[in-house]
């Protein structure tokens, strides 16, 4: 009798509690995320408690924009020692360290030019051009006058040295002595074996944008001194005047060249000096050249940042031609990267969140709360986690299904 009376007293208490909870939910029409929660909460209120069921009342009493109850699948962040890389494009440039510069030793006019195009190969002692100079002719006449007047040997010697310093050869000097006539022009000879190219500092170099578009990059860029060389025009031409000290041409053996690689600035934290590179030239696609990045130069143009990476390339066979395009595969290794699926991440303007599993409401249903995170680069279907999670955490697999369109997610 006592047992029956006790049951009759307890039963109305549970019924009243259930009724008040149901009415309270219906009255909260403006409750954010209510549509996601009302069925779960109602079922929980009507659920007959069993011995093994435990519910954290402090968790489920939180507003729905702090906490969600769901039966969604969960995943754990995983570590990976992943070797990754990127592809980039670029071009071949002159290694200026191997340049031999030939400058004008007097004012004059170019009478004849024997090198007709840039990077024409010449041998040591081969004629590059002939220059007429009134100053040079005056010194020649002075030399002949001293010879005819049998002046002191010291004076003759000084004039000889002056002619030699102006670029005249021993054979040409002997020709003047024997013929007794001045040479109309002075031959400028190449002092080295290599490829001749003329510089044109007043012309605008070919923009890198053309190179990147040709190679499919679609990146607007500029590379200061390492820009591709405009070889279509030159100030050095027959009939042109040169001034004393002006650079006439350069000779480079091109046995080593620069590979200039243009890289998006988003990889600035991954690209380092010494990073391994595999390069393929458009002129020899069957062969891959292995090298390392020797110099990184940040470049800014049109409010766009990118990296110019320089690689020193051996070119003994001469297969790498100046301004030819190349493709590079840059490898870098990051140890211990923590990854989660892309579907677990929710972007909220300036915030990036996941739904962290904090407990179990009942069998098959879990409690989730918001966790702010910071991410790194994405690789396929996964994204690197920089902070906010550990490998012991569990998160919802599909973050987008955890909220409705009216929810405003908050975190503690």
Image (cartoon, rainbow, N blue to C red):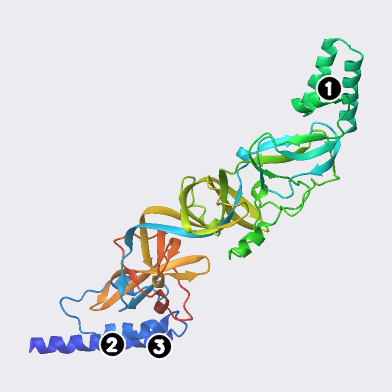
Mark 1: few, some, or many residues within 10 Å (few <14, many ≥20)? some
Mark 1 in CB contact with mark 3 (< 8 angstroms) = no
x and y percentages locating residue 343 in the rendered image: 40, 73
On screen, residue 261 versus residue 402, left or right, reads right
Q: Quadrant of the C terminus?
A: bottom left
Would you name the residue on which mark 1 appears?
Answer: 177
Would you name the residue on which mark 2 appears?
Answer: 16
x and y percentages locating residue 233 in the rendered image: 76, 52
Identified at 48% across, 81% down, the residue is 405
Relative depth, front residue between 318 and 79: 318
Mark 3 secondary-structure assignment? helix
Q: Decide: is 286 above or below 14.
A: above
Q: Quadrant of the N terminus?
A: bottom left
- Real-space Cα separation, disc 2 to disc 1, in angstroms: 130 Å
- Real-space Cα separation, disc 1 to disc 3, in angstroms: 118 Å
Relative depth, front residue between 199 and 189: 189
Q: Earlier in the sequence, mark 3 or mark 2?
A: 2
Identified at 78% across, 35% down, the residue is 187
x and y percentages locating residue 185 in the rendered image: 84, 35
x and y percentages locating residue 237 in the rendered image: 81, 47
Would you name the residue on which mark 3 appears?
Answer: 26
């Amino acid at each position: 009798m006592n047992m029956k009376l006790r049951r009759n007293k307890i039963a109305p208490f549970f019924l009243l509690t259930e009724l008040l909870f149901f009415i309270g939910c219906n009255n909260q029409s403006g409750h954010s995320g209510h549509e996601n929660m009302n069925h779960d909460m109602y079922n929980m209120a009507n659920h007959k408690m069993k011995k093994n069921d435990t519910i954290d009342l402090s968790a489920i009493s939180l507003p729905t924009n702090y906490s969600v109850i769901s039966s969604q699948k969960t995943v754990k962040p995983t570590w990976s020692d992943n070797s990754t890389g990127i592809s980039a494009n670029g071009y071949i440039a002159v290694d200026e360290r191997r340049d031999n510069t030939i400058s004008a030793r007097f004012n004059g006019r170019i009478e004849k030019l024997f090198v007709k195009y840039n990077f024409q190969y010449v041998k040591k002692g081969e004629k590059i051009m002939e220059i007429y100079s009134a100053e040079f002719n005056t010194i020649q006449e002075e030399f002949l006058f001293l010879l005819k007047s049998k002046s002191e040997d010291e004076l003759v010697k000084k004039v000889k040295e002056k002619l030699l310093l102006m670029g005249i050869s021993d054979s040409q000097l002997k020709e003047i002595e024997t013929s007794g006539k001045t040479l109309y022009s002075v031959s400028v000879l190449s002092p080295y074996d290599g490829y001749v190219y003329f510089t044109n500092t007043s012309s605008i170099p070919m923009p890198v944008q053309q190179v990147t578009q040709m190679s499919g990059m679609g990146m607007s860029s500029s590379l200061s001194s390492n820009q591709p060389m405009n070889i279509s025009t030159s100030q050095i031409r027959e009939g042109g005047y040169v001034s004393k000290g002006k650079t006439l041409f350069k000779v480079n053996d091109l046995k080593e060249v620069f590979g200039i690689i243009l890289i998006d600035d988003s990889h600035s934290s991954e690209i380092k000096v010494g990073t391994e590179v595999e390069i393929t030239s458009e002129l020899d696609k069957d062969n891959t050249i292995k090298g390392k990045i020797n110099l990184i130069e940040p470049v800014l143009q049109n409010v766009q940042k990118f990296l110019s990476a320089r690689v020193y390339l051996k070119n003994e066979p001469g297969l790498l031609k100046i301004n030819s395009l190349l493709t590079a595969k840059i490898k870098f290794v990051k140890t211990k990267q923590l990854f989660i699926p892309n579907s677990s991440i929710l972007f909220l303007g300036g915030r990036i969140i996941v739904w962290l599993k904090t407990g179990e409401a009942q069998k098959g249903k879990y409690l989730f709360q918001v966790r702010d995170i910071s991410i790194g680069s994405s690789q396929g279907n996964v994204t690197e986690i920089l902070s906010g999670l550990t490998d012991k955490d569990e998160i919802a697999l599909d973050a987008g299904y955890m909220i409705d369109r009216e929810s405003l997610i908050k975190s503690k």
